[in-house]
Image: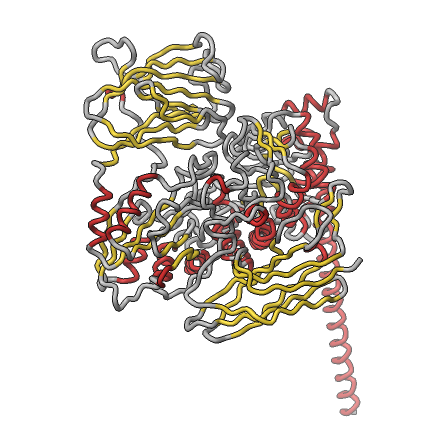
Amino acid sequence: MVKLKTILSRRCSFLIDLIFVHLLLSLFFIHNTLAENQEFESNIDIPGYRNPALPVEKRVNDLMNRMTFAEKIDMVSGAGFTTKSNIRLGIPEIVMTDGPLGPNTKGRATNYSACINMASTWDDSLIKRVGVSIGEETRVLGRNMLLGPCLNIARVPQHGRTFESFGEDPFLTSRMAVAYIKGVQSQRVITSTKHFAVNNQEWNRGVVDVNVDERALREIYLPAFKAAVQKADTWSIMAAYNKFRGAYCCSNHYLLTEILKNEWGFDGFVVSDWGGVHNTVQTANSGLDLEMPDGAFLGDELITAIEQGEVAKDVVNEKVRRILRVMFKSGLFDESVKDYGGLANTEDRRALALEVARKSIVMLKNENKILPLDRGKIKSIAVIGPNADEARMYGGGSGYLPAHYAISPLQGLRDKVGEDVKIRFVKSGRLKRQTLPAIESQLLTPPGADPGEHGLLGEYFNNKELEGEPALRRIDDQVDFSWDTDSPAPGVVNKDLFSARWTGTFTSPGSGMFELGIMSDNGCRLYLDDKLVIDSWIVDMASSLRSIYISLEKDRKYNIRMEFFENIGTSEAHLGIAYYGKGDDINQAAIAAKESDVAIVCAGLRETLEGEGNDREQLSLPKDQVKLINAVVKANKNTIVVLYNATPVLMNEWIEDVPAIIEAFYPGQEGGHALADILFGDVNPSGKLPLTFVKSWKDSPVYKTYPGPKDSVTYSEDLFVGYRHFDKYNVEPLFPFGHGLSYTTFKYSNLDIIKQNHKFIVKADIQNTGNVAGEEIVQLYIQDVESSVEREVKVLKGFIRVNLEPEESKTVTFQLDKSALAFYDVKTKEWITEPGEFRILIASSSRDIRLTGSFELGN
C-alpha cells in the first residue's frame, strides 16, 4: 500500500512537471510570436530606402518614388560646400571639403606632401595607405566628400596646379589615381576626381577653349580618368572650368555623356567646379548632375526650362538617381556626420607623412659624392635661402593644406645635429608673399586733392573694359575691397561684369626694397609713374597676388594707377605694399657660406608663384635666388641646392658650379626631418621624377602654343607630351622623366620575356652592388618597332619599387596584356594592337635603359 502511494505520488509529480514545462514552452512560443509580429510590423513602418540590407538600386528607387519634383530640383544644386538636405525624407547633406592633399575645410590636417611628391615615390601601395588615412581624417573633420584627386596631365611646365597632380605620364598618373581613390573611398568618403577634362593650364582657364586631336585626348589626357572610373569606381567626377571644342566642360555632351557615362559606364554623379556653369539647357542636357556652389542655372531656371519643354523631367530624375546612388554607396543614410569622430593628429599619421617625404625627395645631382654629409667631419653648416626657415608644403589656391605642424629645413637640420654642429642661418633670396598689407590712406593722394585729403580716385564702369563714362566716381581711402558677391555700389554698379580704375599719387614710406602688388580674383593692371609694372588682364577664378620688388626712395611721390575687372562670382581687389630690406642679404649669405664647412641653399618657389589661377611667369628661379646661389657657391664650393617647387625650374645659370642638387618638391609637414635624414645618409634617396626638367623653355613641347591666343589653345604637339617629345625629337633634357640618384648602385641582368596566350610575363634580376641598403624603381617601357600610325619612341607601361640590402638580388616580375601594346584608332574609335615586333626596355629612367629585349606579336 505504501509502495502504491509512493508510485502514485511520483506520477503526480511527473505530470505536474510536464504541465509546467508545457506552460513554459507555450509562454515562450507566444512571446516569440509576439516579438516576430512586432518586428514584422516595425519593418513595415521603415521605408525601404532606410533599410541598409536592401540593394542600393532598390533603395534609390524607393526614395525616388517618395520625392516631389521640387525636392528633386533641390538635389541638383548645392548650398556652398554642401548639397541641400531634405528634412521631410531625412535626406542628409553631402558635406564637402577641398583637397586633394587632404581635407582643408577646417584649416589644419595632416599634410603628407603634395600629390607631385606622391607620384615621385612611384609607390602606389604607399599612396593607397595615404588615401586611407586621408579618408579617415576627412571623416574626423566632419566631411564625407573630398574634392580630389587631380588627374590633369602636366602638359605645361608653368602650370600652377602641377603640385596637385601626378605628373606628365598617363600610366603613372593612372596607377597613383587608382590607389588614392581606393584608399579614400574605403573609408566611405566620396572622391571627386577632377578636372574633367584637358584642364592643363591656369592662364585664362575660365574661358579658354581647348582643341586637341582625338588620339592625343584618348592616349594622354583621358586614361587616368578612365582608370578612376573603371578600376577604382570613383563616385564623383568634377567637370572643369575651361571649354573643350567650343563647349564649356560643365556643359559638354561629348565628354560627360558620350564618353564618361555611355562609353565608360560611369554610374556616379558629375559635379561642376565652383562657378563653372554658364547656362541651363545645354548644361542640363549634357550630363552635369550637380551645380556648385548654388543653383544659379540648375535651380529656378531649370524649372522654367522644363516647363517650356527644353529639358525633360526624366533628365532631372537621372541626375537625382546618380546623386542618391552615391549617397547610399558611401553610407550617408546609415550614419551621420555628427557621429564621425576620432583624432586627426596621430602618431601613425605623423609617421606616414615622414615616410612619404623620405620616399618622394629626389637627388638630381651628386658630383664627387659630396652627399651624404659625413657627421664626423662637418662642424659648421650655413643654411641659406628664402625656403630655409619655412616649410613649403603646397602651391596656391584651393589645394593648399596647412598642417598640424610643419618642420622647416632649418628645424630639421637643427633637430638632426643638435649642439654638435654650428648652424649659421641667413634668410636671403626674395620670394613674393601670399598677401600684402593694404597701402595706408595717408600715403595716397587723389588727383586735384584738397589739403589733407587722402585716397585715390575710383572710377567704376558697368563693363569689363573700362569703356565709356564711369557709372560712379568717388574717392576711396584705400583699395582694399572684398565685395564677395555684392556690388561696389548697389543699384549703381553691376555686381558682376564691371571694371574699375583708381588713380592718384603714392608717397614712399621709406627707402630700400619693397614688394608692391595687387591681390584680386580677376584681371588687374598696375602702372607706376606711367610704366606698366603688373599686367594680368585675364579671367581668373581664384584670388591671387601679383607683385613686384621695387627700390623706392623715402617721401618721394610716384604716380600710381590700378585697373581691375570683375567677371562673375566673388570679387575682391587689394593694393598692397611691404618693406623687404636694404638689399645686402646676398653678401651676408656669402660670408656665412665662406665661414662654414658646407652651405645648403634652400631655394625654389612658394604658393604665390604657382598655384590655382596662377601659372608661373618664367621657368627660371627668381633673379635674386640665381644671384644668391652663384654668390654662395663662389664662397664655398661645397654647396648643396635644395629646391622646393612642383614645376620644373631652369638651372643653366648655376648648375655647372653646384655639385649637389636635391628636388624636394613640396614634402609636407615632415619635410625638414626627411631632408636632414637624406642629407646625412640616414635614409637613402629613392624618389624619381614624375616629369621632365627642360634645359631651356624653347625645348618644351608647348613652347609654340603656350599661352597662345587669349581665348583658345591648340595642343599641336599631339601625343608628344613630356618625355615623348624629348624622345621623338632627340632633345636632351636637363633631367629626364624617371630620373633619381641613390647612394648605392644597382645592376640589372637576366631579362626574360615569356608569352602566355595573350599575356606577357617580363622578368629581370636587380642587384644592389653598393655598400648601403637602397630602393630602386625599375621602369618598363614598350617600343612598337613598326606601326601603321605614328607612335612614341617608347611609352611607360610598368614600374616596381624594390628594396635591396647590399649585395642582395631580387627578381622583379611584370605582367602585361595586349592593351599595353595598343593605340587608339580614330577611324574605328577602337583600341588596336597590330601584329609585329615590340621591344621591352627595362630602365632606371626614361633615358637610362639597362636591359632590352623583343618579341613578336602574331595576328
Please state the horizontal and vertical placement of residue 227, each as a whole percent of the image. Answer: 65, 50
The answer to whether residue 232 shows anywhere in this view is yes
Question: Which residue is depicted at the point 78% across and 77% down?
Answer: 15
Horizontal side of 28 relative to 130 (left or right) equals: right
Please state the horizontal and vertical placement of residue 360, each as a whole percent of the image. Answer: 46, 56
Compared to residue 583, the image places residue 511 above or below, namely above
Horizontal side of 411 relative to 519 (left or right) equals: left
Compared to residue 580, the image places residue 193 above or below, namely below
Q: Nearer the viewer, residue 245 or 307?
A: 245
Given the current orientation, which residue lies at the most extreme front position?
Answer: 730
Please state the horizontal and vertical placement of residue 202, each as a whole percent of the image. Answer: 50, 35
Q: Nearer the viewer, residue 280 or 221?
A: 221
User: What colouring does the structure picture have?
Assistant: secondary structure
Horizontal side of 856 relative to 344 (left or right) equals: right
Compared to residue 477, the image places residue 686 above or below, namely below
Horizontal side of 644 relative to 421 (left or right) equals: right
User: Which quarter of the figure has residue 457?
Assistant: top left
The answer to whether residue 48 shows anywhere in this view is no
Q: Nearer the viewer, residue 739 or 31?
A: 739
